[in-house]
Amino acid sequence: MNIQEKLKLIKRNTQEILTEEDLVKLLETKENPSVYLGTSITGSPSIAYFTWAIKLSDFLKAGFKVKVLLADIHGALDNTPWDILEKRYEFYSIVIPGMIEAIGGDLSNFEIVKGSDIQLDKKYVMDLYRLSSEVSVRNSTKASSDVVKHGDNPKVAGIIYPLLQSLDEVYLDVDVQLGSQDQRKIFVLASEFLPKINYKKRVHVLLPFIKGLTKEGKMSSSIENSKIDFLDNFETIQKKLKSAYCPEGDINNGVFDFAKYVLMTIKEDNNEAFVIDRPEKWGGPLSFKTKEQLEKNFLSKQLHPQDLKKALGLEINKLIEPVRKKLETKSDLVSEAYPNR
């Protein structure tokens, strides 16, 4: 795979790259660069995580070393109870590689890193103090505003959060950080302030924000039926999708986001069609080979939302089944990690 092919693969389905010029230089000068994605172990992972699982698989195909930081300390700073952090870490350690395997990714250059394993290092802590002497409260609060729940009485934890994420780039020894659009302000802070303590800035790749299943547009454990979890059975998936917000002819919703960015990407990679088995009285079966075909058909109202939801439910169930089966053998872990589920 040449540089242009690698660049095209990395760029697909992304929102923004900070900066593309720096990414090109990296590909030109380093044969096997490294990338990381950090995820705070808070609520139970949702199927929206497949967007970055696919992108991590793209990086693997492009010859990158891929690291996923399971941020246990970040999770505690974002209100996960300290006494269940280890169980949440174990839960995520099953789900994340399981997702990449489910889409056919190769895990030979994949690594999971536990946040506290690097963030409690003496040198890391000294650098945290150094960085905190450069970054203002205003800058840090602004950087974390789209990620951390500050509330009416913000805690100091929310201010520390973006400083930790910035330093993680250094201590994971990576060239690129991957994240969703809501992390942009943290990425900008890292690029601006890491050089002030003599560390290079990294390339940042941002993915589009996948909307939830409700009209509020956010996947959240606090919003009922806004997301599909890896423990949801087929009946639950169907029920959530049936009531999901998805107006006819409107692609600005979580149902279509998942169909476009996740399902159709997987189908295109495998040279398969997304088949919607529709009764003859409603026009008969439909088959889509590209996301553009699906979008055009939905915008023109030739494809009804309920037909899309029904077919999507079948595909989602098939996609998460391998991960769900692994979790079903860990019932004690699940109940300890999520006691209120």
Image (cartoon, grey):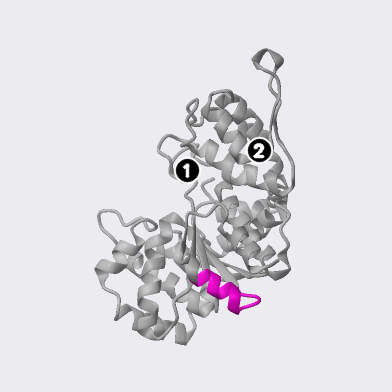
Asked if the stretch drawn in magenta spans residue 132, the answer is: no
Q: In the rendered view, does 70 fall on the left or right side of 265?
A: left
Say which mark, if any, is on residue 288. none
Q: What amino acid is found at the position of numbered circle 2 in the picture? A: Asn
What is the x, y in percent for residue 124?
A: 45, 82
Answer with the quarter of the image where residue 140 lies.
Answer: bottom left
- The segment highlighted magenta reads 22-33
- Mark 1 = which residue? 211
Q: Which mark lies nearer to you, 1 or 2?
A: 1
Circle 2 residue: 233
Left or right of 286? Residue 68 is left
**Residue name at image x 54 percent, y 77 percent:** 172
Q: Mark 1 or mark 2: which comes first in sequence? A: 1
**Is residue 104 found left or right of 14 in the rendered image?**
right
Query: In the figure, is residue 238 to the left or right of 157?
Result: right
Asked whether 176 or 332 is in front, the reply is 176
Is residue 155 at all visible to an observer of this figure?
Answer: no
Q: Residues within 10 Å of mark 2 (few under 14, many from 20)?
A: some
Q: Is residue 55 visible?
A: yes
Q: Quadrant of the C terminus?
A: top right
Type of residue at label 1?
Lys
- Is 120 rendered above or below residue 146? below
**Element marked by disc 2:** loop
Q: Residue at x 25, y 58 (%)?
A: 153
Q: Could you tell me which residue is drawn at 64 percent across and 70 percent down? A: 64
Query: Label 1's element?
Result: loop
